[in-house]
Image: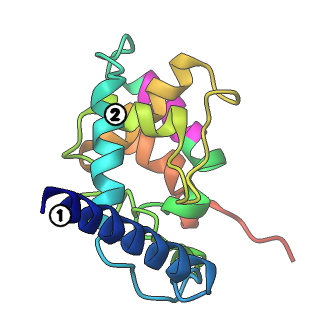
């Protein structure tokens, strides 16, 4: 009786593993950007990301939230981040062509409700299978913190920082 029960559990597990393998190997799993999400895909991805960020906490920023650091962060952002994450009042053309959709950091709440250390971790390490690259080999730790502070305080930036992100169009002269 017990032997049959254990054998049933083992066979059941093997069937589930085989079905999962078949689902992916046969091309039934969604792989295109326009495909719908797999069951529990969003939940599993967020759970794994949140656990990893918690495990590798970045700590508190050694960089102060002041105008020079926010200006430096704005320059870094325009060069490295704006193409996917947008600028204030300027939508991104690539936005609808990506999966998952990149967070528009200057639209709505962006990531202003996330701890700065979470944004730092994401900028430093990237996010697997999302298109978000890791910048730890391109930017130094100070620059990583500066851009993280910028996006964390995107809803309360001084005018000088906003001007770096979106220069005044009236100030640009058009030469014939």
Foreground pick, 14 / 152: 14
In the image, the segment drawn in magenta is 68-76
Q: Earlier in the sequence, mark 1 or mark 2?
A: 1
**Element under label 1?**
helix
Left or right, 176 with respect to 94, comes to right
Alpha carbon distance from label 1 to label 2: 40 Å
Residue located at (39% from left, 80% from top): 37
Residue 80: where, in percent of width, then height?
63, 47
Residue 158 showing in the rendered view: no
Residue 20: where, in percent of width, then height?
45, 74
Image label count: 2
Q: Are marks 1 and 2 in contact (CB under 8 Å)?
A: no
The single residue placed furthest to the left in the displayed view is 1
Q: Is residue 172 above or below residue 114?
A: below
Residue 159: where, in percent of width, then height?
36, 44
Q: Nearer the viewer, mark 1 or mark 2?
A: 1
Please tell me in which quadrant of the rendered image residue 67 appears. top left
Left or right, 83 with respect to 37, comes to right
Tell me the chief SS of the magenta region: helix
The single residue placed furthest to the front in the displayed view is 1
Residue 165 showing in the rendered view: yes
Left or right, 141 with respect to 4, comes to right
**Element under label 2?**
helix
Identify the residue under disc 2. 53
Identify the residue under disc 1. 5
Residue 164 - label: none
Residue located at (49% from left, 60% from top): 85
Q: Quadrant of the C terminus?
A: bottom right
Q: Is residue 71 above or below residue 46?
A: above
Residue located at (12% from left, 63% from top): 1
Left or right, 118 with respect to 140, comes to left
Q: Is residue 72 magenta?
A: yes
């Amino acid at each position: 009786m017990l032997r049959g029960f254990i054998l049933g559990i083992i066979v059941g597990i093997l069937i589930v593993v085989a079905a999962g393998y078949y689902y992916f190997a046969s091309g039934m799993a969604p792989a295109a950007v326009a495909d719908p999400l797999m069951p529990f895909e969003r939940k599993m991805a967020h759970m794994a990301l949140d656990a990893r960020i918690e495990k590798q906490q970045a700590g508190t920023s050694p960089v102060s939230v002041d105008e020079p650091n926010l200006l430096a962060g704005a320059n870094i952002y325009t060069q490295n981040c704006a193409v996917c994450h947008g600028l204030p009042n300027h939508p991104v053309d690539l936005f609808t062509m990506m999966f998952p959709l990149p967070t528009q950091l200057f639209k709505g709440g962006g990531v202003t409700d996330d701890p700065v250390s979470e944004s730092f971790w994401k900028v430093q390490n990237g996010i697997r299978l999302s298109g978000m690259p890791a910048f730890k080999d391109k930017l130094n730790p100070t620059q990583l913190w500066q851009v993280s502070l910028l996006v964390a305080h995107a809803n309360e930036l001084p005018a000088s920082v906003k001007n770096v992100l979106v220069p005044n169009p009236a100030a640009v002269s058009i030469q014939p």
